[in-house]
Structures are given as C-alpha cells and as structure tokens.
Image (spheres, grey):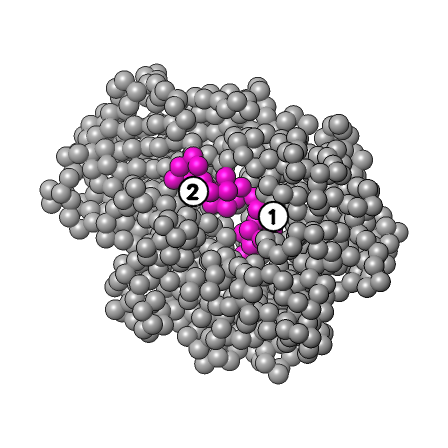
Amino acid sequence: MSTRRAFLKASGVLGLGALTLPTFTAHAAPQRPSSNPLNANPTTLWYPAPADEAKIIEQGLPIGNGRLGALVGGGVEKDFLYLTDVTLWTGELNDTLDGDGQLPYDGRFGTFSLLAKLYIEMPAHAGATGYRRALDLSNGIVTTTYTHGGKQYRREIFSSHPDDVVIVRLKGPQQTGTITLAGTHGEPTVGDAPHTAAVFTGSFPNRLAYSGVVTAFSPDGTVKVDGAELAFENCSDLVIVFSGGTNYIPDAAAGFLDPLVEPAAIALEKAAVRAKADALLHTHVADYRKKYDRQRVDLGKSTDAQRAMDTWTRLQARASGGTPDPELEASYLQFGRYLTITGSRDNLPINLQGLWLSNNNPDWYSDYHTDINIQMNYWLADRAGLSDTFEALADYCVAQLPAWTNTTQAVYQDPRNRFRNTNNRVAGWAVAFSTNIYGGSGWWWHPGGNAWLCMSLFEHYEYTLNRDYLAKIYPLLKGACEFWEARLVETPQGLVDDYDWSPEHGPQDARGMTYAQEIVHNLFGKYRIATDVLRRDQAYGRKMSALRDRLYLPEVSPKTGMLQEWMTPDDIGETTHRHLSPLVGFFPGDRINRDDSPAALIEGVKQLLITRGMESYGWGLAWRVACWARLKDADRAYELFLKVIRPSINYANGSAANFFDMYSFGDRSIFQIDANLGAPAGMLEMLLYSRPGVIELLPALPSAWKTGSVTGIGARGGFTVDLAWRDGKVTNVVVRSVGGTETEVRAGRWSKRIKLRKGQSVTLRP
C-alpha cells in the first residue's frame, strides 16, 4: 500500500501546496478592529419564544465558524447549546468488503457525532416578559432579549472564526447562575479551578481523541469552579467561552490522526482568551461581514404587516397562498449564504447536516453522499459570492485521494462486486455512494461518483480561473479519467458505462445509462482543458477527447417523448422519482442547453421534468427549481421554490421554524441541509445563467420579484455581476473580471460582447 507522499509524488501534486486544511492547533490572538463593524439594520429571523429542547433541530438557531458549530436554544432560566466539531467522527478506513463485494455501511463506516451540550441556568429569571430571540444573518450572531424585574437583559452568541471559540455573552444587572458542560459519550466533566474551567476528554475506538472546555469571566461579579460546574454571581457582563477539538489531521498516510495532539491542552489555551467582550464580538463580526457583504439581495418590498410577523408565522402566511413576501424569500437566500459561511471554512466540507446535530445517531450517519447531496451543498458557493468557501470541498477530496485510490485498486475488482469492470481492468480512483473523513467509503460502489465530484471541482475553476487551484485538483481529474478509460465498454452505439445503477432507482445491471454517459463526457472534456491550461499530460488530454467523441450520448425516447434514462425507449424506473440523474448534463452540467442543443432534445428534457412532477423532498425540489430556470420557465421554478419554503407541519417535507429543510419519513422528519443550499442556488439561476462564454440575465424572473437587485453573483468564465431590474427589465448591470477576459452578456433579445482584463469592470444598460 503506497504512502501519501509516494502517491502525491507519483501524481505530480507534491509541492503544489495541495493540502491546506488546518489541524486543531493553538494560534496567535487575532487583530482586533478599531471601530464597531456591526450592521445596524440587519436581516433577521426572529421568534417570540425559546426553542423547545426536544425540538432543537427544528427550532434551535445555528452558529458556526467552519469547525465549531452549535444549535442555540435561547431559554431564559435554562439556555442550551448543542455543540459540534466537524471532525468528531467514529469509524475507520472501511476497506474490507462485505460478502456482496460492497463496502460496509454500519458502525465500521462511522458517523458524525455531537461533541457536547452546554447549559446556562438562571432559575431566578423565570417569568421574564418581552421575550425575543433572533438569528442576525447580517452580523452572524444569535441574540436573546427579555425583561425581568423591570430590567433589560441581552445575550449574544456566536462562533468566532478568528478566535476559534464559541462565545456566549450575558448582559444585564446582577446575573447569577451556573454553567454546565456535558460530553455526549459518557465522559465525566471535571472542574479545573486554576483555569476557572470545566473540562472533559475522551477518545473513540478508532483512536480519535477529543476534548471540550468551558471558561467564563466578568469585569464585575464573581466566577468560580463549583464541583464540575462554573458558578457566577452578580455579573452585569459575563463572557462564557467554549473551545473543543480533536486530533484529526488531513493526512491519509498518518491514518488521519495525530497522536501527539493533546486536544484538552489546546482547548484550554483557546478558551483562555480574555479580550473585552465588545472586542471579541467586533472581531467576529468584522471577519464574518467580509464574506456576507459580498452579496446584497433585494427581491422587492414586503408589507409592514408581513414585517411585523415572527418568522414561523410569516412562513405559514406565505404558504397560505396570500401576498408574495419578497423580503422573506430574500432572507431564505441569505440564510443559505449564512450556512455556507458558518459551515464551510478552512476545514472539512458540509456534510448532510453541516455542523448541526441533535443526537449521535443522525440518519445516513450525516455523511458525504456522492450522488447529489455533497455536490448540491456547493452549488451556492460561487454563485453567492463565496468562492473561497468552496475550497473545503476541494481540500477534502485531495486529502482523501490516496486512500480512495488504494482502496479502489485493491478491492474494486472483487468478483462479488456487481459493479466491477467486466474487462477486469482497474485504474485511478472511485468512491461509494457515501464517504467518511478517514478515506472510507460505504454502502454500494458508485462508479460515477468520481466524475460527478470532478464536475463540481472543475466548475469552481470556471468561476475563478485560478491556475493554482486547477493544479491542486488535477490529480483528482486525471485519476478519474484513468478509472473511466479502464471501465468503458465498446458497443455498436459507442463507448458506454459498464453494469451500473442510475441513482437511486431502476435496474442495477444496466449499461450506458444517461447519468454516467453525461458525467463522463463532462469529465473527459474538462480534463482536456486542464491539460492545456496547465500544459501537462497534453497527449493524454487529447486521448480523453478522442474517447469523449466515441461516447454514446443519450436519446429522446420515441415512446415517452422523454430524455431516456437508460439505453432503452422504455421508462423502467419510477416516473416521479426524487432524483433527476438523467438531467445531470442539463443541470448542473450544460452539454444540453437551449443555445446549442436540438429542439427535440430540449423538449425531451422538459417532458422528463414534467413526468418527474412538482413534488419531492426539499433537495429534489431544489434541483427541479434549477432545471426549470434553465428552461426559462419562471412560473414553475418559483412554484417549486415556494414548496421548498412551505412550513413543515406534522413531519411533512418543508422548512422548519428555523428555516432548516426537513425530510419527511411519515411519522418523523429529519434535517438535511442540501435544500437549504440548493434552493438559493436555484434562485440565483432564475436571475442569472452563466456558462463559459455566456452570461444571461433574468432568464426566469418570477412576477413576485419584478423589481430588485442583487450584487456579487458569480458567473462562469471568471466574472462577477451586479444586477438591477425594474418591472422585469434589466436597468443596470456591472460585470467585473476575476480572471475572465471575454464573454457575451444577454438580456432578452439584447446582447453585447465584452472584453476585460482581470480586475476591470464595465457597466451596461441594456
């Protein structure tokens, strides 16, 4: 089994700075802002009552810094935070096959896990009035305000990226109570009087070590250790600091663990921050707003009556079929951006639930699903002015690549694997439908997963045109090409995928399914571009182009009028299935598009969408939003978006009170984050469609958003766009180059070709 260094050297990536994920380490104090950076007119989600702890996943408000996350309850006499570290995973490499030739999907695979629960108790404050809790999207904080005994109280809670801690600030006269920190895996918490801290440590059977620490300080009153708790008395401004972490590192050769890291010592050092409370808040807000303020969203004005409603009431009012509420809908887009900023920074990428858990048994282990979910999690980043948050996905894939490659070449060709290559050749790398953080895959092999990951990775390059980034992901592109070069089967119709499964339905032994043909076509074409840009392996790039030209490409069924999902005119799957796998070449890909494709092919796409229907889980609806936007059908796209944000009542699909997307299981529902990121991406697709060489404005603008503006929309080809419109017509557009040089801008029948140098901009008024 090759080492990581040997593998990277062989792949040509060593020395390119490919791995940038930090470990849990101490760091110098950040620079503190000299002025107040708070946005005084923030976009907020607000509620007139605390969250019910039994319903924290639907009602708790999320905070995060990319590594540390929490759901905040907002209780007065008993507040609670459910805390996570993105690297707290059970499980292992998981490279020993089960009897059917597939990789286990059980405890051996592992699960994302809850790190701790933090409780702040002030029983004397029972009976408070004037209560309000809010998630301030503009400043990245959760606030709770109330009145007790005629006096005003305020709490501010946030997860600071610069300080790498969670902060809880309690403001108000003579506050007295206790702070309790509890691990969630049976670890005992102990008091640490010298540090005025409570601490727990633990480890899993896989040797992942972890720790959590809470401290508190106040300029007045007292804070002391009382057994395993912290007790505070008569404090008017109390700062509670939580830190925690693990010994996970992004190094396959080390088994993704560093035995020399001592999480408790690092957590104690981070939690010892003693800057003034305002300085801690301002440091966080200044850092957060650098990202959040890149995109302003105005979809029109709501009424005073709508603004006066709390968020849950407002969601229900919008779903009743009443007046459009454009500010509510804009806040849903900004909430998706908030989750991206708080959930994807300098560490592991966003999994099925991001940073937010309510227990240690999340469905599907809260893993990385490779047949739509992890890809959808990153549709928003570039479109929403958050390109740098995409790097977490790229760095994860680069770090996992040595393990993925070794496992593929060692066991993929097992004769029990029904998805093996029948020509008995194997090369490159593949993954299963689920991946963990230890190089492991689980469930069934997913041959197309590598190509779809590469589609997402390369698309990010198309937004940024960053050559260093392209060099970083190049080994992934090449390895996926090597896998597919070995796998493809020659038929009279052309080269086709071997026996495979169209996610996640239909026969498991079909060749040449549309999903695989499209993503492999995309892979070979994008790889050829990469070889030319980087001037590496250009002969191999030309070889992949030649293979792409020999691929069988999907057809429209003469029986159904739909784009075929398999190499048969019959529809042999579920007609209303949640997945839109055969449309991957239409969205997120664009081999099939309204400019270049035959009308019959576009009609086949439309008929398949009609047949799939207008009902699904949230992520299925989000995918449909984007597809109908590409078809320029604003009414259908908007109708589907409204179904994403309809309130989830009685465990139905839809949005919870805290905007989390809920996935219905009939008698229960679970949080799954992909719709929260995919639906806002679909909203931006309704406002701007881009592919290299083309930027199309307002392709699917609904009448509910007839006047508005959005800044900082990412456009493929290396541009960003500020866009304003009135009564459905573009009034002003500013195109900036982040590396792109030439594109065509379109608005209805108007078009103009523009040429720019990097950093230049042009203002257009169609």
- Quarter of the image for residue 590 reads bottom right
Residue under circle 2? 356
User: For residue 357: magenta?
Assistant: yes
> Which of these two is toward me, 625 or 531?
625
> Callout 2, which amino acid?
Trp
Residue 99 picture quarter: top right
Dot label at residue 370 = 1
Mark nearer the N terminus (2 vs 1): 2
Q: Is residue 154 left or right of residue 422?
A: left
Q: Quadrant of the C terminus?
A: bottom right
Q: Main secondary structure of the magenta part?
A: loop
Look at 31% across and 45% down and name the residue there.
55
* Amino acid type at image mark 1: Thr
Kindly identify the residue that appears in the image at 46 percent across and 55 percent down.
676
Q: Residue 38's spot in the image, x, y percent?
A: 37, 51
Instruction: Determine the residue positioned at 47% across, 32% down.
Output: 29
Answer whether residue 164 is visible to the viewer in this image.
no
Residue 34 vs residue 268, the one in the foreground: 268
Secondary-structure class at tag 1: loop
* Vertical arrangement, residue 76 with respect to residue 4, above or below: below
Residue 421, position as x, y percentages in the image: 77, 45
* Residue at mark 2 to residue at mark 1: CA–CA distance: 20 Å
Most extreme residue toward the bottom is 749
- Report if residue 730 is visible in the image: yes
- Residue span colored magenta: 351-380
Q: Which mark is residue 601?
A: none
User: Within 10 angstroms of label 2, few (less than 14), some, or many (20 or more) residues?
Assistant: many
Q: Quadrant of the N terminus?
A: top right
Residue 509 placed where, x, y %?
70, 52
Residue extending furthest right? 539
